Amino acid sequence: MIVYQATKSVFLRDTHTDDIERIVGDSFRRTLGWTAGASEVRSWKESLTSMAKVLIDEEIPDDVGVAIEFNIPQSSKRVDLLLTGKNQAGEPRVIVVELKQWQSAQLSAKDAVVSTYVGGSVREVSHPSYQAWSYAALLEGFNEAVYDGGISLRPCAYLHNYQADSVIGHAHYATYVERAPVFLAGADERQKLCAFIKQHVKYGDDLNLLYKIDNGRIRPSKMLADSLVGMLQGKQEFVLIDDQKVVFESALALARQASADSKRVLIVNGGPGTGKSVVAINLLARLTQEQQNSRYVSRNAAPRAVYEARLTGSFRATHIRNLFSGSGAFVETQPAAFDTLIVDEAHRLNEKSGLYANLGTNQIKELIDASSCSVFFLDEDQRVTWNDIGSRDLIRSFAQSAGAQVSEMSLESQFRCSGSDGYLAWLDNALGVRKTANPFLEDDSFDFRIFDSPTELHAAIREKNKRANKARVVAGYCWDWASKRDPLAYDIVIPHSNYSKRWNLDKSDRAWIIAADSIEEVGCIHTCQGLELDYVGVIIGDDFVVRGETIVCRAEKRSRHDRSIRGWKAARKHDPSGTKARLDSIIKNTYRTLMTRGMKGCYVYCTDQETAAYFRSRLRKVPSEAAAAPQEAETSPEAPSGNVLPFRVLKPGRVRPYQNAVPLFDLKIAAGSFGDFQSAKVSDCEWVELPAMFSPQPGMFVAQVVGESMNRRIQNGAWCLFRANPTGTRVGKVVVAQHRSIEDPELGGSFTVKVYRSAKRAAVAGEWRHTSISLEPDSDDPSFRPLVFGPDAGEDLRIVAELICVLS
């Protein structure tokens, strides 16, 4: 997703208006759905103005593409600036530019790490060259248009306020500066950057590359378990990004410094998808290569089982067993027997060990005692059983008692839930984990849906699983494990939906999440925590319901076989309020954990209808005037199954054309009768209220697009926001086009929705004339072919409207 894109000439014009930060800021709000902070706006003004001084060079073609704030797919990372064009040989090239306003930095002994003033304090961050290179690698890894399309990326960093010194270009960083040169303040440096651009971009591309990148198919997600063999063999399967790299290098430094007499403890906080396990496994691989006696430790057996299954056949069984361990295996371990213990999912640690929880003193204490260095990765909001005790305070307390030096760091970069920080903040709010500023889910980057039937949900997940075996259904533990005694019995039975499935709990190897035949089973918290999927389907049981606006957690609705809350009834007698708070936290954290397993999407079915309605009511922000009396309720077209409409149809008395509403047209009517959209009257059609991120403007209208010819950008039946009678360049844009020779079988008329392309040649007086115009499909189905018009036919081609946004 690109916030701002234009040719170089348009970018320079926007910059010269001395208002580039407003232009980008407005586009940022429209594209991403929230307003940029004041510091980010200031940085746009300064950095983009500095970049304009580089691009003003006449030898850089006017039709070079310029993209600002490109959101890398499936992550929360944004590339500052992309430049697109072709080299001398006509090969596609993209320059990735990391812009910094730094004025100074301090050298670090850690690989690719510097210290500088960021966010109000001096802290360690990635070197700009490493950052630019890693973003290019991330973009190449996720985007098929780049990976398969022969598009070559050239990263660099531009620190336009930084005077040359002995730090930023130090030999310690030479490896990364060679991969991504760094350019500093001053006219000479500006000329060097200009030369770098001209070296790789000789010709412009009129935004074609930006279109391909912005609309490129997303490559299948790289799963940690699938990459494990390569990582342990020393291959760089995952490029660590920003805070991941800093945490990794810090942990590595502590592991090298530690000894039995000088213990080190590192606490790493990170939410779902921030890369805790990726950093942990990278650390295990590196320390093993350095011949440290290290182990990956987890309380939950499922991740270990999955990792061991992936390694089987590539490593000896004894070697595998020496790499992974449960958290209860250190009761009798000698002090400092291990160099480094890497504790993943540390929030799941227990006090006691053993089958009957009667061995040892405390698992946290035992892990610290058994190693010279211990690294704890945790998210306290993922404590999901009565016995989970892992917390920052407790780890710090035991570390200090052992005389260890304690460090604490955080991981924040989001690489799950399509990189949507908004989804995670909304989920915390919706589940009552904590209050956030996201009461409504307005971020469409993550595929979240509510289903009316568990059968429909399971069918949708089954379909998603066909591509890569990376989709599963999970549920809260609200159904008894009947199949344990009777293998023919069903466990999760929902009669009114004709839904009957079995728990996966009979899988003794705990590798259910990767088993080829497990799509028909239902997983639970015990077999999916610490692991990831592309899509997760979650059945929310009767232990979590909503009454009115109040969330009610009901431990008594959990299965009698669920040992995760065993002992709560006895505890309630002695401490009713404390027990209730603890139970509420466990139930909420359970669903938070389940609903964040998906990297691309989460589909939900609630056994309680009122709870389903509660989640639906928070999928889109409802304006305050929606709280009308029941008899005055608005009407709206019926929503597709498992989804909600992205707008409301207003009653005529409430419509203020293009102030609080835009017209809702049939596309056939839009392409015919209503040529002048600004003159549409309230009586001409229905009027709809747009999501809060959009400001209604004359010429805007909403219509439904049907068919599969644009399914890579517009799903069949999607509601879209259009702008009528568009001006300016149309190349690369999705347009509604009308011509007498068009016979669109999907839309049923002499118009179509396609991507606009054109070829032009110079004419007299510096003008341009079309030599051909093509309307191109963007579909998974290769049978759809472009519509091509010659220069004469093109004059009769009418561009009715352009697509602003797909609303649903």
Image (cartoon, helix red, strand yellow):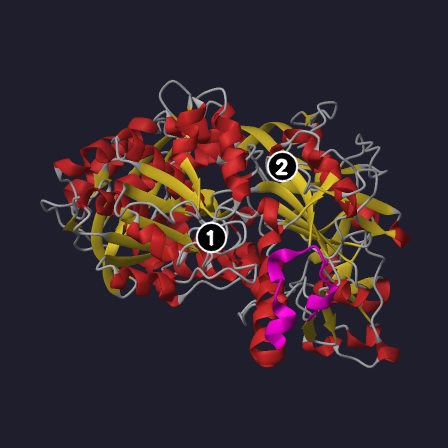
**Residue type highlighted by circle 2:** Ser
Q: Position of residue 43 (x, y in %)?
A: 33, 58
Q: Secondary structure at mark 1?
A: loop
The answer to whether the residue labelled 1 contacts the one labelled 2, judged by CB atoms less than 8 Å apart, is no
For the residue pair 505 and 649, the one nearer the viewer reads as 505
Q: What residue appears at the point 18 percent right and 45 percent down from the top-left corner?
A: 257
Is 432 on the left-hand or right-hand side of 102?
Answer: right
How many labels, in total? Answer: 2
Residue 50 coordinates in the image, percent (x, y): 28, 51
The segment highlighted magenta reads 553-572
Q: Say above or below: 94 vs 302.
A: above
Q: Position of residue 196 (x, y in %)?
A: 26, 32
Query: Is 274 placed above or below 117 here?
Result: above
Q: Amino acid at mark 1?
A: Ser
Q: Is residue 509 left or right of residue 176?
A: right
Query: Taking 196 as reference, is 285 left or right?
Result: right
The residue under label 2 is 508
| Tag of residue 142 | none
Magenta-span inclusion, residue 305: no
Q: Is residue 560 magenta?
A: yes
Callout 2 secondary element: loop
Decide which of 552, 19 is in the foreground and name it. 552
How crowded pointer 2 is (Cα within 10 Å; few <14, some 14-19, many 20+) is rated as few
Residue 353 image label: 1
